[in-house]
Image (spheres, rainbow, N blue to C red):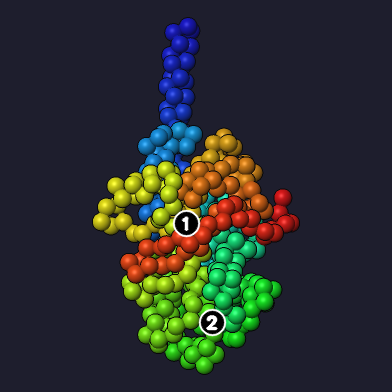
Amino acid sequence: MTRITTRLGLLLGVLLLGTAGARAQETIRIGIPVGLSGANSVVAPSVVQSAELAVEEINARGGVLGHKLALEVADDGSGAAGAQKAFDSLVFQKKVNALISMETSAARNAGLPIVARAKVPYIYTSFYEGRSCSPYMYVDAWVPDQQVAPIVDYFMKEKGAKTFFLIGSDYAFGRGMLDFTREYIKKTGGRVLGEEYQPMDASDWTAVISKVRSAAPDAIITSTAGGAPNVTLTKQMRAAGLRSLYGNLAVDEGTAKSMGADGDGIFISASYITGIDSPANKTFLAAMQKKFGSDLKTPNDLSVPQYEAVYLYKAAVEKAGSTKPDAVLKALPEVAFDGPRGRIQMSKQHHTPLTMYLGQVQADGSVKVLKSFKDVDPGDQCPKLP
């Protein structure tokens, strides 16, 4: 009897050790729906690279609660229909533990009902038009309350601009950004001479440029879908010889670099530029260069929040002691990460204060910093959320 009991005990011990070992090897899966095709295809590769580096670094240091991280990337086509398929696949087929993604607002809005149905944590890493609220979504990128003022104030106070023309893509981001910009210009004593929109995938801006030329504004401010539309609009404005001040609310440093000489002189307002002089940013850039070499896409204001969001998710899981959605969602506003942009904490109504930089694109695609604004508050974004 004693011998049988001992054998049963040993067998049970082996089974328990095997189960524990299996649990230790379970992978935490992060879903990344992103626009590998469509409007965001210019910038999406840099976003994926940033996520890949974060996962590699975290896994090399033991993972999260003893588990390895893995990425599941899905192309959302930069739009609503593709996003529905991508979110559905990642959440219900791949069964990811969380979603972390840079997307167009159209894609985000299409994916949010799926996020709510699955109750999966979602960190949105794209700058956007603001005031998109969900108990399951946190945002670590800028909103217009943080980004618009530096450009408009500089044009009016430093450059003497009084009249403006606004150009945007005809969807939530383009209209939302310019709605805020229009009201801010009026509030600060400026005048908007015209406002024009084109579809997200527009490539011919001839008619809009003709209206700008007739209006002859002191400054042009654009808010187009990140990536391809920025390139085509800028190229055609330059070819038309427009000489107004040009502020772009949607261009990232990587896209600006891809514009070549056409990007020279564009004013941007961003929470990240490669020239941030901090140990954390220098370490990040060196690690990106080492990992990707000649294939490295320029880190930018759309890709760096993705890198930081992976670390924020890690911190939340560790604080919660679990990947259970409710526990992670509760922990997310309580954790912070000191990354390339500085200290990031999504504690203000699921958004984060950010240091913003006013910069001007140079002929070589780099960005010259003109001014910086520390810890700019995102304002009231989601006051009804706990």
* Most foreground residue, 364 or 383: 364
Disc 1 to disc 2, C-alpha distance? 27 Å
**Residue assigned mark 1:** 272
* Most foreground residue, 157 or 200: 157
Residue reaching furthest top?
A: 2
Residue drawn at point x = 33 percent, y = 72 percent: 260
Decide: is 208 above or below 373. Answer: below
Residue drawn at point x = 43 percent, y = 16 percent: 10
Query: Residue 22 occupies which quadrant of the picture?
Result: top left
- Report helix, strand or loop for mark 1: loop
Decide: is 185 above or below 111. Answer: below
* Most foreground residue, 16 or 298: 298
* Most foreground residue, 118 or 131: 131
Residue drawn at point x = 42 percent, y = 22 percent: 14
Dot 1 crowding, Cα within 10 Å, few <14, some 14–19, many 20+: many
Decide: is 40 above or below 345. Answer: below
Residue reaching furthest right?
A: 384
Q: Which mark is residue 360?
A: none
The three-letter amino acid code for the residue at tag 2 is: Asp
Residue drawn at point x = 34 percent, y = 59 percent: 297
The three-letter amino acid code for the residue at tag 1 is: Tyr
Does residue 25 appear in the picture of this structure? no
Residue 152 rendering spot, x and y as whole percentages? 58, 71
Residue 323 rendering spot, x and y as whole percentages? 55, 41
Query: Residue 151 occupies which quadrant of the picture?
Result: bottom right
Q: Which mark is residue 218?
A: 2
Dot 2 crowding, Cα within 10 Å, few <14, some 14–19, many 20+: many
